[in-house]
Image: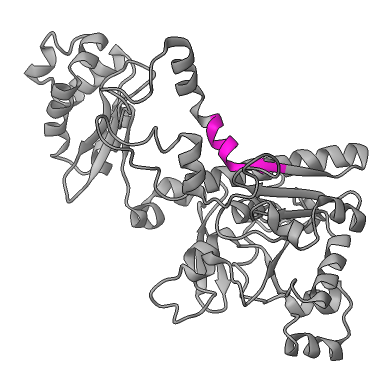
Amino acid sequence: MVKLPLDKQALSGLRVIDFSWIVAGPQNTRILADFGAEVIKIENEASLDYARHIASPFANGSPNKSPLHSTLNRNKKSITLNVMHPEGMEYLKELISISDVIVENFSAKVLEKWGLGYEEQKKIRPDIIYCSMSGFGHSGRDKGYVTWGPTAQAISGLTYMSGLPQEESAGWGFSYMDHTGGFYGCLAILMAIIHRNKTGEGQHLDLSQVEAGIGLTGTAILDYTVNNRPFRRPDMPPGNRAPERRIAPHNSYECKGDDRWCVISVTNDIEWDLLVESMGSPTWAKDSKFTSMESRVTNQDELDNNINQWTQQFTPQEIMKFLQEKGVPCGAVQTPSERVEQDQQLKHRNFIATAPHAELETTRVESIPMNMSETPWQMKTSAPLLGEHSADIYLDLLGVPGEELGRLYEEGIA
């Protein structure tokens, strides 16, 4: 990846105080850091970011080897600062006075308890942009409730909408709403920066992850409101089939190997004819049950079983290459190692970025999935070691005398 001059990065000159932890907040601030913002992660050894504990079997107790922490916190700085100590709080306020943005994803009561609500922040830095990312937001009956990504998914209705037909809800796996909340938070900050550039005014960005999730349930809510049709019914959730468009085949199919799969999605009769030709024009495909889109949708179970018999002869990559070259939408279901080590398209787009790491030698993380011709994201540094930048920030940014720094460490302030 080409290294740009600092002033060419889109967010160069923006300083962010990052109180966030686990996924939602760090997802937000990693995008800011990737595009040049100076993100300072405030940490305390007595209460570490939970993501630092999600480590490989070879971590040996180190808080610096977590793959999750590595990918969410690249390009950031880390300072250890005990905000519960009065002197530590004064240093924090000094940091806020010279920063542009504050990000946290605690419950609504935490910063208020610290005496650092938005009104107090404005006294320190009048044009501060404060992004809070709690489960329910900072107002209303439930503002003090604690949530995690899966909690927000459940309350928003997304969990209810997951799974297979006639089966219990399965949930969405790993913290889907944490990642989505991070994107919304970053978008809000960028809009607030534009507003501040125009008016000189900062603002409080009060994000609710539950509300962000509800926004993703819009079609189901509309369907119930207009048609009085509940989401969960005999053919819903749709599993791998198409819920909104009546198209078939549209599913995952077994391939050669242990637990190997491909996906095929045929959207019109032209693609169906190409698929039939690709399969060698089998006799069953000429049956009236499969000659129109409507009949294929009606007979999806038998259709999927027939296609499954054909796909089992090939690997996922063989099927994808063969059908795509014929003009049939198809994709290989990849394993993690295939995506990282073998996918030539991802390699071409430099999707896996690397950087030196003091304890891991090299870290490998996913890139930002968009290329910008003038101000691309950059992988400048790996995720920081715990407190890696403390001395630099205390000495250079806050002007703490060298002889004083040792006392801050000894007294548990730094």
On the image, the x and y values in percent for residue 272 come to 25, 17
Q: Which residues are magenta?
A: 206-215
Residue 124 in the image: x percent, y percent? 90, 58
The answer to whether 167 appears left or right of 92 in the picture is: left
Quick check: is 211 in the magenta stretch? yes
Which quadrant: the C terminus?
bottom right
Q: What is the x, y in percent for residue 35?
A: 69, 52
Q: Quadrant of residue 117?
A: bottom right
The secondary structure that dominates the magenta segment is helix
- Total tally of numbered discs in the picture: 0
In the rendered structure, the answer to whether residue 357 lies left or right of residue 7 reads left
Residue at x 84% of width, y 79% of height: 395
Residue at x 74%, y 61% (from the top left corner):
113
| Nearer to the camera, 84 or 62 | 84
Confirm whether residue 38 shows in the render: no
* Relative height, residue 39 to residue 185 (above, below): below
Foreground residue among 387 and 46: 46
